[in-house]
Every structure is written in structure tokens, then in C-alpha cells.
Amino acid sequence: MSKPSGPSGSSRSSGPFDPSAASVSPAPPSPAGRPRLDWRIRFAVLSTVWGFSFLLIKVGTEGFAPFQVTFGRLFFGTAVLAVAMAVRRERLPRGIRTWAHLSVAALLLNAIPFSLFSYAELTIPSTLAGICNATSPLWGMLLSLVALSEDRPTRRRVAGLGLGFLGVLTVLGAWQGFSGLDFRGTAMALLASLFYAIGWIYVRRTLAGDRHSHLSLTGAQLGIATAQLAVVTPVFTSMPESFSPAPLLAVVALGALGTGLALLIQYGLVAEIGPTTAQMVTYFIPVIATAAGVTVLGEELSWNTPVGAVIVLAGAALTQSRRRPRANRAEPSVPAAAGPSEPSAPSGPSASSEPLTPCGPPGPSAPASPDPRAGRAPAAQP
């Protein structure tokens, strides 16, 4: 469970950026090397996989303890990325500083939020968990006003923040006194989304200038998170007496598809169509999560849930909106020393260093090297 998730495919305000640290952005694939599968199809697959992640978490908790679901998710997700690294001959990051920051990022973007979503879905429906995940951009904007001095608020973004939290109150049925609502489970889901926002800001401030590849950083981060859960899980859980097929397959799919494969698809989309379009997947996740929960699990749906979800997404979209920089007609900028196939390095405050972080309730959550084209927060991995 969300978005997200990290390397150039993550999120989702931009932090300090050192042009000399990341001078080259991956060039778009050439027509000859363009992926065979159309990006729209991959976009739909990514939306579906992350949307169904909340359903998979729900099914997984029917046979395993929440910590075990999280551990399995991270284990199989790491396995997929390890295979991808081996195929591409990628090496793990080097340097104590990098590994220290990755350890903190793994805790904030993977271990804690993934576990919180698993515990939350013991008592709340997967539809509500998916909608809570959509609040990550709202938390991110709120925290960035304090933690990122260069991320100045605008009237539109502040309005989006207020609208988004109004949507949350609508989903929770505030006018009914929150009757029938499990406060503990809902609070855990919202807290998980808050941790994604905290993690994204931490990654921007600590790993924005790292030269390692996105795949290398993400694989290392998920590996660390897996190790963290390997230590915690035996302490708080006992070995399952049986391995039911449905929960077991759900955990395997959650890790291999909803975490490992989803991150690879996300980074591929960012490289091909840019982060602005790729991050739109965030707005499809709660819709698919709701549809999956209602149709597959038979969860009840009152009118305020979809209405509130639409309001939350509208507010989240406003918080991610930015003014387009005005072109300097008198002195047009000319890339310096940029070869024909090598984009020039971004410079100045207008260059965004936002890493696309794979993390989120079901999945978006890894740190990533800055993508100069990224101008918005990364999608939250469910």
C-alpha cells in the first residue's frame, strides 16, 4: 500500500539540489529502443496493480499476521529487484553515508507504513485504506511548508490542502459523529500516509545528489527494509500453523507484482513520458481500490465514501499544481556543453530535484536520484 515509492520514478516539493551532483538525466529511449508495450498499457497495468494492492493486503491478513504480510511483501519485492539488478549488472550503492540514509528511508517509506496498512486492514475495509493512501500528497504539502523552505505555498495549493482534508472528513462521515468508524484502524492508515510524506522529504534532503542508479538505490532500500522486518517479525509473531493458498498467493503477488514489478514499471514510465504524466497514476489508485473491494470482497460502500474520495483527489491535485516559469525572452537559456544525446544539467532554483519515491500503502517507496524533469511529488505506492 502508495506512492511510492525513490529513483526517478518516485515523488513524489523539491529539496536542495546540487547541479554538479546529478548533471545528466536519463535520455528518453530512442525510437529503436522504445519498449514494445505502449506506455498507456503499462500505465493501466501499474494503476491496476497498485489499486489491487489494498485488496491483497486484506486477503493476506486473513492467513498471516500483519508483520508477516509486510515481511513477505518486502521479501518478494526485493527478489524481483535483485533479479532486475542481476540482469542489468547493477551494483549495490557504496558509502556508509548512503547506506545510513537508505536505512532511515527504508524505515520511513517501507517498514513502518507497510506494517501500519497491514494492521489497519484488520479492522477497516480495503476501500477506506485505499482512500487514506490518497492523502499522502496532502500531508506532503503540509510538511513541506515547514521542512522545505524553498517550497513556498500558493493560494491554490493551500486551497487544495483545505479541500483535501474536507474530503477526508466526508469519507469518515464527520457529520454523523464518525459512527461505525474504527478509529484505531483509520488512524493507522492515515499515519501510514503521513510516514510516506515524511520519508519523501527525508529522501529529498539527504539523497537528492546521490549518483547511484535508481534501481540500485531502490533495491538496496527494499533489502534493508526486508532485514528490518526479519528482525521484528519473529519477536511479535509466531510461525503460522498452516499456509492457506489464498493468503499465501496474495502476499506473493503483493510483493512480486505490487512492489517489485510495479516499481520497475513506474521508473520506465517516468523515463519515457516524464514524471508529470506518470504521477497521475496516484489518482487512479483509490478508484481501483474501491472497485476491487466492493466487487471482489463484497465490502459495503456508502455514498460519502466515493464523494469524499473525489474531493480528496481534487485537493491532492491542487496541492501538486505549480506555476509555470515564465520564459526569458530577452536572454533565452542555452544548454552549455550538452552533447546531442546528453541533456544539459539543470541549474538554479527552477530545476527540480524531486526524487520519485516508490512507496505507498500497497507499494510506491524507494529513494532515487534526482530527476531534473520531476516537478511534482512521486506517486504513493500502495
Image (cartoon, helix red, strand yellow):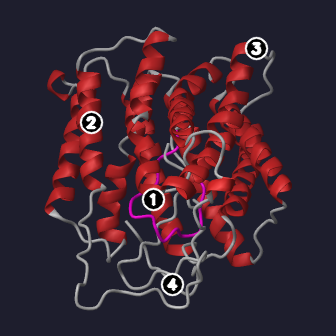
The amino acid marked with disc number 1 is Ile
Tell me: residue 353, above or below residue 376: below
Please name the predominant secondary structure of the magenta segment in the image.
loop
Q: Residue at x 48, y 71 (%)?
A: 372
Q: Mark 4 Cα within 10 Å, few/some/many (few <14, many 20+)?
A: some
Q: Is residue 265 on the magenta stretch?
A: no
N-terminal-most mark, 1 or 3: 1
Residue 298 position within the rendered picture, expressed as x and y whole percent measured from the top left: 46, 8
Mark 4 → mark 2, Cα distance in angstroms: 37 Å
Tell which tag, 1 or 3, sits nearer the viewer.
3
Q: Mark 3 Cα within 10 Å, few/some/many (few <14, many 20+)?
A: few
First to last magenta residue range:
366-382
Q: Which residue is mark 2?
A: 168
Q: Which residue is mark 1?
A: 198
Mark 2 → mark 3, Cα distance in angstroms: 35 Å
N-terminal-most mark, 2 or 3: 2
Residue 21 position within the rendered picture, expressed as x and y whole percent measured from the top left: 58, 83
The amino acid marked with disc number 2 is Val
Q: Which residue is mark 3?
A: 245
Q: Residue at x 54, y 73 (%)?
A: 208
307 relative position to 191: left or right: left
Q: Nearer the viewer, residue 28 or 299?
A: 28
N-terminal-most mark, 1 or 4: 4
Q: Secondary structure at mark 4?
A: loop
N-terminal-most mark, 4 or 3: 4
Q: Are marks 1 and 4 in contact (CB under 8 Å)?
A: no
Tell which tag, 4 or 3, sits nearer the viewer.
4
Q: Which residue is mark 4?
A: 18
371 relative position to 85: left or right: left
